[in-house]
Amino acid sequence: ETGVTQTPRHLVMGMTNKKSLKCEQHLGHNAMYWYKQSAKKPLELMFVYNFKEQTENNSVPSRFSPECPNSSHLFLHLHTLQPEDSALYLCASSQDSDSGANVLTFGAGSRLTVL
Amino acid sequence: GQNIDQPTEMTATEGAIVQINCTYQTSGFNGLFWYQQHAGEAPTFLSYNVLDGLEEKGRFSSFLSRSKGYSYLLLKELQMKDSASYLCAVMDSNYQLIWGAGTKLIIKP
């Protein structure tokens, strides 16, 4: 496989469930990102990993927990979510996170619905 | 604060030309990006401008004026497959990407 792959594509969960989103990239990139995309709103950066080290955590609630075991894989662990967390969660990768022409390659996203 | 403005929605006719504007106010500037996102799909990179002027890439062109904090994406010879959302993003002085809310482009036959 090439590009950025996200699983699952769709997830419905209750407020007390625990689930995880998975992202995998086969591009040899060193930086990986989680974004939240809500309708008619700008993309919200959640977390950035550069060379497996977390470099950004944009005041994200602790009910979202990222994990980056290696430079090809990124997880987002979810627990006790709220209905307002329902959104499209996009994973992206790039060569590194600290350069000007930093082109992101995105996955197709995981559509999360919290009941 | 930092801000990116672009129209919420635009409609154009197949075969025509459309210009999608983006204005920005950011802390520093390290380049402006345009991405295309079809419904239910991943955003994909279209263009990157860091110097003033027009960059042409096939049917798509992107223009930047740093002094005016302004960019536009020009789409020529519109095709039905160009129906998508177009996202404008600016990289600030800390290499953070500031995103607009996107412009949904509807192409009519």
Image (cartoon, rainbow, N blue to C red):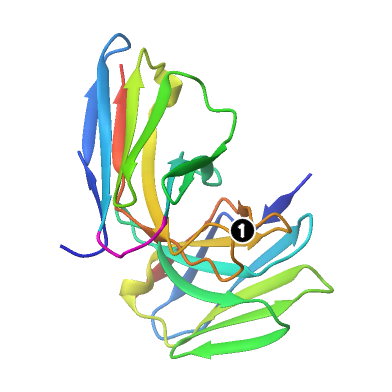
**Taking B97 as reference, is A85 above or below it?**
above
Relative height, residue A52 to residue A79 (above, below): below
Circle count: 1
Quarter-wise, where is residue A11 in the image? top left
Q: Secondary structure at mark 1?
A: loop
Position of the C terminus of chain A, as image quadrant, is: top left
Name the residue that disc number 1 marks.
B7
Q: Quadrant of the N terminus of chain A?
A: bottom left
B4 or A89: which is nearer to us? Answer: A89
Q: Name the quadrant containing residue B97.
A: bottom right
Query: Percent x, y for residue B65?
Result: 76, 77
Crowd rating for badge 1 (residues with CA inside 10 Å; few <14, some 14–19, many 20+)? some
Residue projecting furthest to the top: A16
Within the magenta stretch, is there residue A27?
A: yes
- Which is more toward the observer, A55 or B16? A55
The residue lying at 64 percent from left, 88 percent from top is: B54
Magenta: main secondary structure: loop
Foreground residue among B62 and A90: A90
Q: Residue at x 38, y 17 (%)?
A: A81
| The residue stretch that appears in magenta | A26-30
